[in-house]
Image: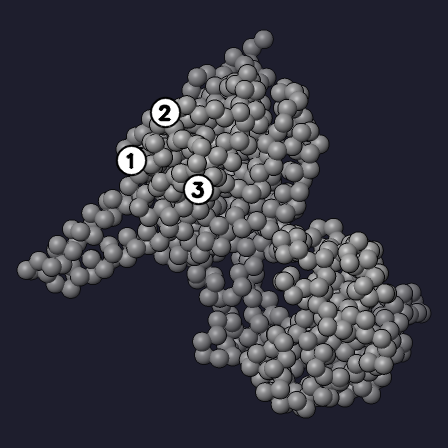
Amino acid sequence: MSIPAAVRKRRDELVELIEQARTQYYSHDKPTISDADYDKYFAELVDIEAKHPELVSADSPTQSVGGEATEEFGEFEHPTKMWSLDNVFDDSELDAWFARVGNHNFLCELKIDGLAINAVYRNGELETIATRGSGSVGENVTASLEYLTCIPRKLKAVKGTKFPELLEVRGEVYFSLAEFDQINLEVTATGRTAFANPRNAAAGTLRQRIDNRLEAVAEAKKRAEGKSADSKQAASLAKHVDELERAKSALSRLGLIVHGIGAHEGLEIPAQSHAYELLKSWGLPTSDRVKVVKSVKEVKEYIKHHGEHRHDIEHDIDGVVIKIDSLNEQQELGYTARAPRWAIAFKYPPTVVRTRLLDIGVQVGRTGRITPRAAVEPVLVAGSTVSFATLHNGYEVKRKGVLLGDMIFLRKAGDVIPEILGPVVELRDGSEREFKMPTKCPECGSKLATEKEDDKDLRCLNTRSCPAQLRGRLEHLGSRSVLDIEGLGEKAARALLEEKVISDEGDLFALTAEDLQRSDFFVKGANRELAENAKLLLNQLELAKTKPLWRFICALSMRHIGPPTAQALTREFNSLDEIAKAPAEQLARVEGIGQTIADSISQWFAEPWHLDIIKKWKDSGVVLQQAQVESGPMPLAGLTIVVTGTLNDFTRDGAAEEITSRGGKASGSVSKNTDFVVVGPGAGSKEAKAIELGRPILDEAGFKILLADGPDAAKAHLGLN
Ligand SMILES: [Zn+2]
């Protein structure tokens, strides 16, 4: 059967695209296609080759690891080959792998988004560091060794073990997410292309010729100290020193996690997990998230768990690596041309994609803050289509160095709003335009200003009647974590204000059926009968009037005041009037409130129209006082309780309310002073911390016992005391 011409053509296209991308990755460290596209092309090529094996040639990208060593660096021939891994992208592909390899003990570990290196130790002393390169030959980056604090120069001697004469340790150098963001800001601030991911940043950092930089500084110094030296030479020296310092600093911020062993003459190692233990005992950094499991089911649980928690980890991961633990069994399965048969990488959906920045608009928040919002060409990332990304403020647009029309890298991590990492400078064609922050509020036309001179945020100062701010405050007031008023969402807020049913939030609790009848949004039919949403809203408003004081404090939209601070205030004060009268010094002593917030609260109460809102609320029957719980029993007095994860019968705020109304303290972080940690599904680091510190952990049932019968009953439930 002959191969259709279209298939041949596509195959050639894919080979070219992949080769191009690989050159970009490994030689310039600035990819112009995203990881997702690369993986897609690669998978498509593998698919074509599987259907038409006669198309597979020795030079196909599927037959080599990719990333030839570049000329700039000395070459290093790895004593034993560094393999690449085959990828799978879903359960069915993973199942196919399991079917091929059969039953084993599997070692699961996180696939860190970093750069693979080979560290060669001779008799326990580090001799060479090289990148993977082609797998057989890598780049010798030993010159940077002095500044790489993450790699031990000498292994730690352990009684009873002897260092092999030759030992190859394989690992991943990487930047934590915090360092990655920092490095990217340093890069975009100088007008260069952002690193699309931590791996590129790590590669770019490790593959700097630090020896050349040292030389450049030495030469510049000689010139600057020479007889004919002038200010130009001094400036040149300063520039070279600055570059060197930056390179050194970046190198020192790299981390390392080891994930393999190459040559190890004279060592008897039965399993991969055993190798990790040995390397750890010698002082090499291993991951404490490695797990050996006995079944396919457990492997899948590991994949699922870390897929859900990938954004809680301090570094980026792009998947999970599964290895057969026994080294004998590994050898039996052996290798294909490019990858071991005994290991597979399960890739998670990518979090970084490339798309085009179409426009930047601005939004006005409920406190008047102006936020640029980027409109991007819609793109699928991490399971959802993204059309907008945040840019925080005008200063941020400058820092990220993006122009309208730029191709950009965009990252979406978990539920947070997608963010722009930076532009792909190489892809500009000159048609891109600079974004200018507006000088007037797009909603009310007021002149925009910063509040203080060194503020980065521009604001619309027309707090009282800017429609955007009014709408924002109403919506906030109705939200779940504030007064939780169903029926008061964005659309309702807009209708109430635009149809002049209310003039501001002060009128809200005096709303009547007749008022709502005036609005098209709240009526139905030709007779303008009150619609369901109107009845719901009126009902909810009535219920809200007696809600706890802290919720009303939040509802006032004072700056810096969220549920925890509002709750802290209600532990010290019994009514809104008391808070209004309290001097700033007294407010500043409340937990979580410093001088700045205290001053801002005092200023808020000094504004007459703010006091009008409170007066109108009171006139409408809103309580604005603590419920008289003091007379009731306080079974949780003196106890600090942390709630984490999702509970069935309580919202997070609801749980906190139950605790505080019984005299307890609801805290957000686990410490040795925490009395109980209530854990629901989805709990993350707080549960781990509780275990680490040995604090009592309650499930939801235990929490209910604690609320009903107090701490002793809860402890008995746990089998303590
Ligand atoms: Zn405005």
Front one among 290 and 41 = 290
From the viewer's perspective, tell me whether residue 148 is left or right of residue 649. left
The percent position of residue 514, horizontal first and vertical second, equals 89, 78
Label 1: few (<14), some or many (≥20) within 10 Å? some
Front one among 218 and 188 = 218
From the viewer's perspective, tell me whether residue 362 is left or right of residue 118. right
Q: What element carries label 2?
A: loop
Q: Is mark 1 on a helix, strand or loop?
A: loop
Q: Residue at x 67, y 40 (%)?
A: 304
Nearer the viewer's eye, disc 1 or disc 3? Answer: 3
Q: Residue at x 28, y 33 (%)?
A: 74
Q: In which quarter of the image is the N terminus?
A: top right
Label 1 – label 3 distance at C-alpha: 29 Å
**Residue at mark 3:** 283
Label 3: few (<14), some or many (≥20) within 10 Å? some
From the viewer's perspective, tell me whether residue 532 is left or right of residue 596. right
Tell me the kind of residue under disc 3: Gly
